[in-house]
Image (tube, rainbow, N blue to C red):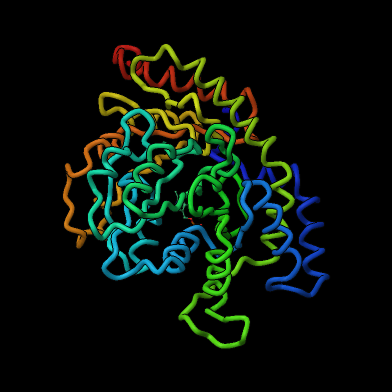
Amino acid sequence: MSEPVRYLNFVRFAECHGSELRERFEVVLESGIYIGGSEVDEFERAFAAFCGTTHAVGVANGTEAIELVLRAWGIGRGDEVIVPANSPVMTGLAVTHAGARLVLADVEPDTGLIRPAAVEAALTGATRAIVPVHLYGHPAEMGRLREIAADAGIRILEDAAHAHGARYGARRCGSLADAAAFSFYPTKNLGALGDAGCVTTDDPELAGQVRILRNVGLASHGTHDVKGYNSRLDPVQAAILRWKLERLDGWNERRRELARIYLAELADLREITLPAAHPWATPVWHAFPICVHDGLRDTLQRALLEDGIETNVHYRVPIHLEPCYADGGWEGGDFPVSERRASMLLSLPLDAFHTESEIARVIACVRAGLLRRSSPAATA
Ligand SMILES: *Cc1c(COP(=O)(O)O)cnc(C)c1O
């Protein structure tokens, strides 16, 4: 049997680029500076320029990037923050850990993006912010969301953890609202060799406050005026990220190329629905999620695995059904689109380091897997 098709092939990446990354690592090692310093400053400058914002503040991970912005805005006890129900649980946890009440909104059936009408319906006098997620690297409907936020006098924090480099019209995700939170978890389009994250914004006051909060609340005059966090970005990760950032547009273009192959070659299959994209979006395909009909998602996932093809589900459990939110007062059926999509989603392998022949093999195995299902005689 041929080699398995990994969902993401980090080992192949290391084979291609290991020597360049080792060089970056050695520069940091020999600098003797292992917290802060010029590597972090230079990455922050480069990432802000890439996103088209005036500030980028490196932090320890994407979850804390969200939490620190909410804290810096003074959002906490008694406040409400709206998050899409189908986001990974971290988006919800950041709101909860900031002390605010997590309010969920359902999503669009075709894209899985937060539904502006559901956001409007969820607004109360206590709502302070919306956290739309640019899910799978496709920007949320920011035009409509910005109108809603402006009318309500509340802020928007982009959860851009899937969307490094994606564009809404001409502008990059990360520059579309009051602030944005990025994760550089290894599986993200821009991934570190461990945990890392970043906040981007044009607001100097917010950037300054996040800098204080990430560094245990230490103010420039030497006292700790707020109870801060240990949430700094390591220089080793910053050095790796700066090297990868220079190649990110190329890798994202490669993802778009491979996504176009899937979209063309799977278009005729009635048993699945392919991911939708809006004409105003330049997505970066953090994932390529198909929806598998007739309750056949798990069957197809197993069939693909038997053929040596790794897939993923983004995400299997909506936030309101996670056991850790059993105290949230939600129940099954509250966010029907998120729940239906969660039962159908299957992310096919797609990253910049897959070959065309691997993608062709995935396509052939998806076809064969669905065929086996629809004609039981074929399996006899
Ligand atoms: C990965 C991710 C996060 C959390 O980022 P971490 O760096 O893992 O803390 C938040 N939101 C979304 C949409 C993510 O995909």
Q: Is residue 90 above or below residue 268?
A: below
Quadrant of the rendered image containing residue 223: bottom right
Q: Looking at the image, which is closer to me, 175 or 8? A: 175
Look at the image and tell me whether residue 183 can be seen.
yes
* Residue 311 x %, y %: 46, 36
- Going 39% across and 62% down the picture, which residue do you hit? 94
- Going 66% across and 36% down the picture, which residue do you hit? 251
* Residue 197 x %, y %: 56, 58
Q: Looking at the image, which is closer to me, 209 or 187? A: 209
- Going 80% across and 51% down the picture, which residue do you hit? 19
Q: Is residue 234 above or below residue 373?
A: below
- Outermost bottom residue: 223
* Residue 355 x %, y %: 65, 28
Q: Looking at the image, which is closer to me, 307 or 164? A: 164
How many numbered marks are there? 0
Quadrant of the rendered image containing residue 370: top left
Q: Is residue 166 above or below residue 257?
A: below
Tell me if 72 is positioned left or right of 60 in this view: left
Tell me if 294 is positioned left or right of 32 in this view: left
Q: Quadrant of the C terminus?
A: top left
Look at the image and tell me whether residue 317 can be seen.
no
* Residue 368 x %, y %: 43, 18
Q: Quadrant of the N terminus?
A: top right
Q: Looking at the image, which is closer to me, 93 or 369? A: 93
